[in-house]
């Protein structure tokens, strides 16, 4: 099997292929910057549903009358929803992630409101060995999001384990 014939696919057998997403651990280098596209527009309905699903009773997220009394003047999008959407936007690059092992910071820098569109970029800060197993390596990334007006809304740092080449549980050799 020639794995470089169709780099976006894993050959499972004769004339059988499966799409392959994400970068192998060996592909990451310190200083790389990724712009993850497309963006995502977060609705106020998304926000309300997140608050209901997580029992978040902070009225600033879903009560427009209450929010009008605050410095923001309208409901803020719940932070957990923002983090979920931003991480979701990175999936094609980090699809081969085994797991996130640490969040070293999550800074909300500007308010996010229903109707805002968020875009995300990541920068690789660290690439190193995973001493606990040989199937993955450790990377640290800084994630920065901006809204439709190019205002930075969030900065996060996390460390994650990324599967090494040919070690993903659903790779051709393990299929």
Image: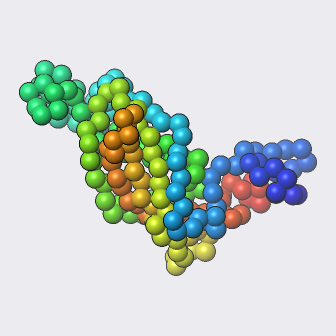
Front one among 124 and 47: 124
- Residue 168 in the figure: left or right of residue 30: right
**Count of numbered badges drawn on the protein:** 0
- Quarter of the image where the N terminus is located: bottom right
* Residue 160 on image: x %, y %: 48, 62
Residue 75 versus residue 36: which sits nearer the camera? 36
Q: Position of residue 79 (x, y in %)?
A: 29, 42
- Residue 82, quarter of the rendered image: top left
Give the residue displayed 54% in from the left and 61% down from the top.
32
- Above or below, 165 relative to 129: above
The quarter holding residue 23 reads bottom right
Q: Please determine whether, in this image, residue 173 is positioned above or below residue 72.
A: below
* Front-lying residue, 22 or 98: 22
The correct choice, above or below, for 114 with respect to 109 in the image is above
Residue with the most extreme left position: 69
Q: Is residue 115 shown left or right of residue 128? A: left
Residue 76 percent coordinates (x, y)? 24, 33
Q: Residue at x 13, y 20 (%)?
A: 65
Q: Nearer the viewer, residue 151 or 62?
A: 151
Q: Residue at x 71, y 63 (%)?
A: 166
**Residue 44 in picture, x, y percent from top left:** 31, 25
Q: Tell me the residue at 58%/51% (across/down).
A: 93
């Amino acid at each position: 099997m020639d794995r470089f014939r169709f780099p976006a696919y894993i050959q499972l057998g004769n004339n059988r292929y499966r799409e392959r997403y994400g970068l192998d651990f060996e592909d990451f280098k310190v200083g790389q910057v990724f712009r993850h596209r497309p963006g995502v527009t977060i609705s106020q309905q998304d926000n309300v549903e997140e608050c209901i699903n997580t029992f978040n009773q902070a009225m600033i997220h879903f009560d427009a009358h209450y929010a009008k009394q605050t410095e923001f003047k309208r409901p803020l999008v719940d932070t957990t929803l923002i983090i979920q959407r931003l991480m979701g936007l990175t999936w094609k690059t980090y699809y081969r992630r085994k797991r996130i092992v640490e969040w070293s910071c999550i800074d909300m820098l500007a308010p996010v409101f229903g109707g805002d569109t968020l875009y995300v970029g990541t920068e690789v800060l660290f690439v190193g060995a995973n001493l606990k197993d040989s199937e993955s390596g450790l990377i640290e990334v800084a994630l920065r999001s901006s809204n439709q007006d190019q205002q930075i809304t969030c900065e996060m740092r996390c460390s994650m384990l990324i599967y090494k080449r040919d070690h993903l549980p659903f790779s051709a050799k393990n299929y």
